[in-house]
Amino acid sequence: MKVFVDGQYGTTGLKIHERLVQRNDVELLSINEEHKKDPHIRIQFMNEADVVFLCLPDQAAREAVTLITNPHTRIIDSSTAFRTDDAWVYGLPELSNVQKGAIANANRVSVPGCHATAFALAIRPLVQCGMLPRDYPISCHSLTGYSGGGRALIERYESDSTTESIDRFNRTQHYSLNLDHKHLPEMQKFTDLAFQPVFLPTVCNFYNGMVVTVPVVTRLLPNQPSLQNIHTALTDYYQGEAFVKVIHPEATKGMSQSNLDPTLCNGTNNAEIFVLGNDDQVLIACRLDNLGKGSSGAAVQNMNLMLGIEEGLGLTRRNNKT
Ligand SMILES: NC(=O)C1=CN([C@@H]2O[C@H](COP(=O)(O)OP(=O)(O)OC[C@H]3O[C@@H](n4cnc5c(N)ncnc54)[C@H](OP(=O)(O)O)[C@@H]3O)[C@@H](O)[C@H]2O)C=CC1
Ligand SMILES: CC(=O)N[C@@H](CCC(=O)OP(=O)(O)O)C(=O)O
């Protein structure tokens, strides 16, 4: 099977390459770095490949799709360009078995945004079972590594220049303070919320890793569920999933003293969901690697599903410690 990664020298593309290069069922069509934007070579590879990963800025991804004329080429796009486009399938298989089936049969799959993945995994099951009303005023916060911003942000963070706008001592900061983050449309659509959440991300001084948190006031919910009720709903929903694990409350005892370290899923395709707090105020947290389940891991997981290949191939599975 021939695979081409367009944007293979970027942050996401490199990680997809790393995951695929070890596989003997994949023949990688590789472009020299100096030719990475050469339209002739890209058109040739894109139309020769069975699967094309697009790891490009939005506009370049839109253009690349128009260059693919081979009807058999299947596209997995990691940009924001097509995530809420009904002609594309949203590549979050854990949404439902229907979603898994849609991905398996799709020719066009969009890889969800990293914040949106964590948010949807945390909230969607609760909306679906009616525990969280569709019009609940949701707020959400995310701590993310700076690699989420791609090469440009990585260079800013890793630059030694004191003239940079982010100096060495001020590298953790909120962004999207207009509350208009580009993931909001997909965050609303794939949780089935009536309104967009209030979403505030914070970029931190570590390369990769992410924790997204959603606070919920239980007395505002129908039937006032306990922390245990919320935990059970999430655990039941993700039963049998290879890459989503709901952490047992016993394992989170003392969490308030310790630290919900955003980097502990790094290097894996795993998402871990925590239900913290008490029966009055619950904090649902989802931890993942923005370069794993938040992008390239998810992209490869989608490819495996599309090709009917065993889940886990080319991906680091969780260990079953909890
Ligand atoms: N980083 C992350 O955690 C995540 C990223 N994404 C998405 O994935 C996509 C890629 O992001 P990321 O890897 O971070 O970005 P990078 O900036 O790190 O990489 C993009 C790569 O594409 C190349 N490129 C740009 N334009 C073209 C073009 N017209 N033809 C061919 N190559 C081109 C760039 O080259 P050059 O640098 O020389 O311009 C670069 O090598 C984006 O749409 C992003 O939103 C999605 C989820 C998470
Ligand atoms: C730190 C940082 O800037 N992160 C990016 C999210 C990266 C991601 O999920 O990718 P997409 O760009 O494809 O949506 C952001 O918040 O815009």
Image: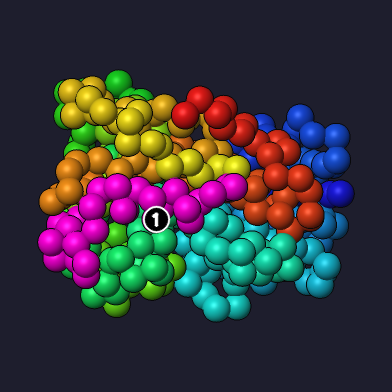
> Which quadrant of the figure has residue 163?
top left
Label 1 crowd bin: few (<14), some (14–19), many (20+), radius 10 Å: some
Q: How many marks?
A: 1
Q: Amino acid at mark 1?
A: Ala
In the rendered structure, the answer to whether residue 62 lies left or right of residue 23 reads left
Q: Which residue is mark 1?
A: 233
* Magenta residue check for 27: no
* Magenta residue check for 222: yes
Residue 56 visible somewhere in the drawing: no
Task: Name the residue located 55 percent from the left edge and 64 percent from the top edge.
Answer: 96
In the rendered structure, the answer to whether residue 88 lies left or right of residue 265 reads right
Q: Which residues are magenta?
A: 216-241
In the rendered structure, the answer to whether residue 305 lies left or right of residue 207 reads right
Residue 195's spot in the image, x, y percent?
A: 26, 74
Residue 17's spot in the image, x, y percent?
A: 68, 37
Foreground of the two, 166 or 216 = 216
> Which quadrant of the figure has residue 313?
top right
Q: Cβ(mark 1) to ligand 2 < 8 Å?
A: no
Task: Name the residue located 62 percent from the left edge and 32 percent from the top edge.
Answer: 316
31 vs 78: above or below? above
Task: Name the residue located 39 percent from the left edge and 68 percent from the top edge.
Answer: 129
Task: Name the residue located 50 percent from the left edge and 67 percent from the top edge.
Answer: 83
- Applied colour scheme: rainbow
In the rendered structure, the answer to whether residue 114 lies left or right of residue 176 reads right
SS type, badge 1: helix
Residue 102 visible somewhere in the drawing: yes
Residue 95's spot in the image, x, y percent?
A: 51, 61
135 vs 243: above or below? below
Residue 221's spot in the image, x, y percent?
A: 20, 66
